[in-house]
Image (spheres, rainbow, N blue to C red):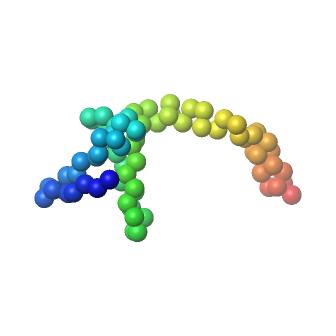
Amino acid sequence: METSVTKKGWTIIPAPIRKRHHIKEGDRLTWLDDGESIRIVPIPKDPLKALRGAGRGEDLLERLLEVRRADRA
């Protein structure tokens, strides 16, 4: 998909992208510029709630214990 930029620097987020990422009026976006490319990332209204369950399936306790054992050694 392709959009253009107005004189004021405005651009339009294509409707399929807005729908896929549930972006609505008033939502905030962050622009990440690494010097070679630009990424636009939606900011969740409740960032903590958005992270809920992100560590599921990971054996986080075992990882922590391994790191601590390595630190002691």
Image coordinates of residue 22 in percent, x first then y, are: 38, 35
Q: How many marks?
A: 0
Residue 7, image quadrant = bottom left
Between 5 and 68, the one nearer to me in the picture: 5
- Looking at the image, residue 54 sits to the left or right of residue 25; the answer is right
Between 71 and 23, the one nearer to me in the picture: 23
- Looking at the image, residue 54 sits to the left or right of residue 15; the answer is right
Between 28 and 68, the one nearer to me in the picture: 28
- Looking at the image, residue 67 sits to the left or right of residue 7; the answer is right
- Who's the residue at 75% across and 45% down the image? 64
- Who's the residue at 40% across and 69% down the image? 36
Image coordinates of residue 48 in percent, x first then y, are: 50, 34
Point out the residue furthest to the bottom here: 36
- Looking at the image, residue 25 sits to the left or right of residue 48; the answer is left
Image coordinates of residue 25 in percent, x first then y, are: 26, 35
Where 59 sits versus 4, above or below? above
The image quadrant where one finds the C terminus is: bottom right
- Who's the residue at 21% across and 57% down the image? 4
Image coordinates of residue 52 in percent, x first then y, are: 56, 32
